[in-house]
Image (cartoon, coloured by chain):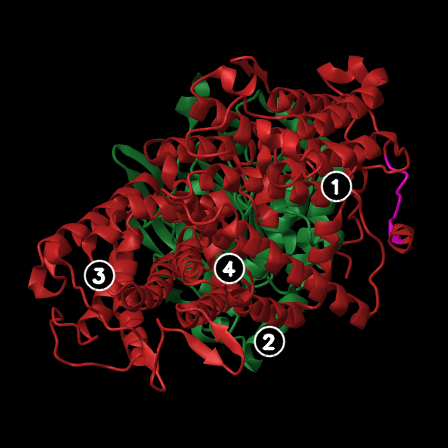
Chain colours: A green, B red
Amino acid sequence: MSAKHAMPEAPAPRTPSGAGLLTASGVTMQFGGLRALNDVSFGLSEGEIIGLIGPNGAGKTTFFNCLTGLYAPTSGSVALRGTPLPQDPAKVTDRGIARTFQNIRLFPSMTAEENVLVGRHVRMKQGPLSSLLHGPGFKRSEAEARSRTAELLEFVGLTRFSGELARNLPYGDQRRLEIARALATEPSVLLLDEPTAGMNAQETEATRQLIFGIRDLGTSVVVIEHDTKFIFTLCDRVLVLVQGELLVEGSPDEVRGDPRVVEAYLGAPPDEVEHQIHAAEENP
Amino acid sequence: MTALEKDVVTEPGPAVEPRGRLAALAPYATALRAAGGLLTVIGAYLPWATFVLNEGPYPEKATLEFFTAPFGVSGFRLHLLVFGIVALVLAFVRTLPSRGRILRALGWGIVAVTVANGLYLTVLGGGFGAITAADGAVAFGAIVALIGGALVLVGAFAGGLGEQLRWGRPLGRYAEWAILLVVFTLLLLLVAAVLTSGGQGSVANPYSGAVFLSFLGAVGGLLAALHAAGVLTWVTAMSERHRAFSAIVLLVVALALPLTGAGTQYWMTVAANIGVYAATAIGLNIVVGLAGLLDLGYVAFLGIGAVVAANFSGATAARFDIVLPFPLVMVISAVVAGIFGAIVGSPTLRVRGDYLAIVTLAFGEIFVRSSQNNIGGLTGGSNAIPGIPPVSAFGQAFNEKLTVGSVELPAGALYYFLIVVIVAAVMAVFGNLKNSRLGRAWIAIREDEDAARAMGIRTGPVKILAFMIGATLAGLAGAFFAHKTGTVSYESFRFLESVTLLAAVILGGMGTIPGAVLGASILFVLPEKLREFSDYRLLIFGIALVLIMRFRPQGLVPDSHRRAELAPEAEPPPPDPGTGTATGKVAVQ
């Protein structure tokens, strides 16, 4: 494989581009002898949609886990609006970063409504004592949470499944419910891990519209996806992660034209990839 | 009846389609059902035992003495007679869409009653001859009734089960209140009848266990039939609509138990014991049922509450010389137990699943061993702490009779009232917490701990809170327990008790209040009733548990959520996949 030799040196550590809503600088994650992430930096600005692509095992989900505090990076730091994020998923969510999971992780035996209500957890003002006594404060916070939940379910188009157990929802609707649950935490950044996996063309399109809608409501979005067509037509900026390193970063057009991406990520003969990319361009 | 029938929504629904291996018998379904009902009726009228048993004639004149009073059918034979007649009638009522289900319930009821009595007679009579033919006497009642029950079952399955009936529109408020009143009163009478059926198990009353089991089978069949007919669902929906009213009526009805046939000192004591374990089981239900944390040492918290109360009671063996008023003692016991709950809960931050179970198991053992060794002189060691004085208020000791006007309440009734109030309070705590931010956080942790954390739930404190609140409730019950029994010994809080409590929660249905109460009742009444089976009672008990878990893994009164999860017949309607994708309009705001 000559492609391997042609691969350029790892890019020098760069200062995060973009304005500073969410910034990661020099994030490295080492699992024993395996370096899953090596010195990855990026920046996300308000109202931006960023795509994160790369072959399987490139470290995309690991990167998400570092951003959300599930993993403590070996070195490097993550900051939201300039303040470093704590290494505790619960506190990170409280600070305004929400996520979905690659393999759907809803609360299967709770209803759709209850799933979203759990998402309201960090925003509800209801202490244990209030939970116990059900006073007027409880009723207020509960009513507020339920009306917000109803709005969110309507937003993602799941109102009719409100009382249905999450496990019984069709696959695509489960992904949408997971997004509604994440939105319930009122995030300023939403991290979506393969939101269209297993969806047909129609559902993928609905998801793309949904993500635009989320952006329009003022939440910035980072999306991991294998579907390059989906990414290139959705995102303002695309990051390519290969073997734990940030290979290329730029607008969809720049990334699409970059030969390194073609070689390293897609791993197919250039002309075939070109064809694929053009096809994506022609049918957005 | 006709007025009610009008309200029955006869949904066209899927036609009653027989399925499975018995489908071939479908053409004979009606004949099978009718034959089964008829045989059951005949069985009820036949003698059941070929001889008079050593302990005296079998109850309900089921022995050969039957011939002295041919039509005086009573007891279990009356139950069989009723079931048989209803099955016979239902076999020919074609308009009832759910009759297959009702017949199935009746069939199981007939089988249960017959097996309970037949098996008992066989064992007691020393062989199969006891219920067939021996010494020139014949008594085929059990065999005939069993065949009858089996035929009803086969007929029910062969003809298709049909849908559970759904009852129609809500009635007016006062009509529903009246119905609820009647239903809850009947419930009280039923509970009293179950509790007292067979009488007090003792040497003088050798048949109490068998009579009780048989009655339990009949009640089970009846309730299953009512459920199949949609009556239980209908009443449940009605009580959901009038929550406050139902709660008050239920409380009043519970307090009225001493006025029924169960109003004797013995049954009051049994009922109060059930109350203690019901309150404890509900507390455990928070930990296990809601938060999904397996706790194998939970009874230790009941013990801690009891020990604390004992030490402040003024008993001679008490460590402290202070006598505090009972309400204060309850609070202190609950708080101390809660603190220990938090201590035990803290390892849960690091330990999950099986490992957590072992940690809690170890804690339970620590409690038992320390109290056995009388650590700190707090527990009395192997001498226990005896002589704890009864609770008293206004000069009235709670363990004595009370006469109010013309009504005389049996001794122990006051303790019973007290535990009813405690259980009601514990229920309120459980119910309120379950439907709150905290309760949802617990359930979320049970479902998927990592996802719960990603939703901003600080799982550590939330889990410790579950342990703490559960322990507090157990401590409350423990304080009551200490005063009611008068003696606190480590032997009441062994591992077996923890397991029994856990079994009560799982058997009754995880995460529900009626489940925990029902489970606790069954697990603590059965041993009382099965005394004369002494050596076999744990065996019977174990077999019953295995059977229930095999055929009803979601518990007797399942949570609506868990029911969907574990029910063998997947009933929840799969949402229409055709409409699942149409969300193009979604994001266009």
Q: Which residue, given by chain and number where applicable, does mark 3 sit on?
A: B488
Q: Are marks 2 and 4 on the same chain?
A: no
Q: Nearer the viewer, residue B458 or A98?
A: B458
Q: Nearer the viewer, residue B190 or B433?
A: B190
Of helix, strand and loop, which one carries label 2? helix
State which quarter of the image contains the C terminus of chain B: bottom right
Subunit that carries the residue with mark 4:
B
Q: Which residue, given by chain and number where applicable, does mark 1 sit on?
A: B575
The amino acid on which the numbered mark 4 sits, given as a three-letter code, is: Ala
Q: Are marks 1 and 3 on the same chain?
A: yes
Q: Which residue, given by chain and number where applicable, does mark 4 sit on?
A: B262
Name above or below for residue B194 compared with residue A37: below
In this view, the residue farthest toward the front is B68
Q: Which residue, given by chain and number where applicable, does mark 2 sit on?
A: A139
The reply to whether dot 4 and dot 1 touch (C-beta < 8 Å) is: no
Gap between marks 4 and 1 measured at Cα: 49 Å
Dot 4 alpha-carbon crowd within 10 angstroms: few under 14, some 14 to 19, many 20 or more: many
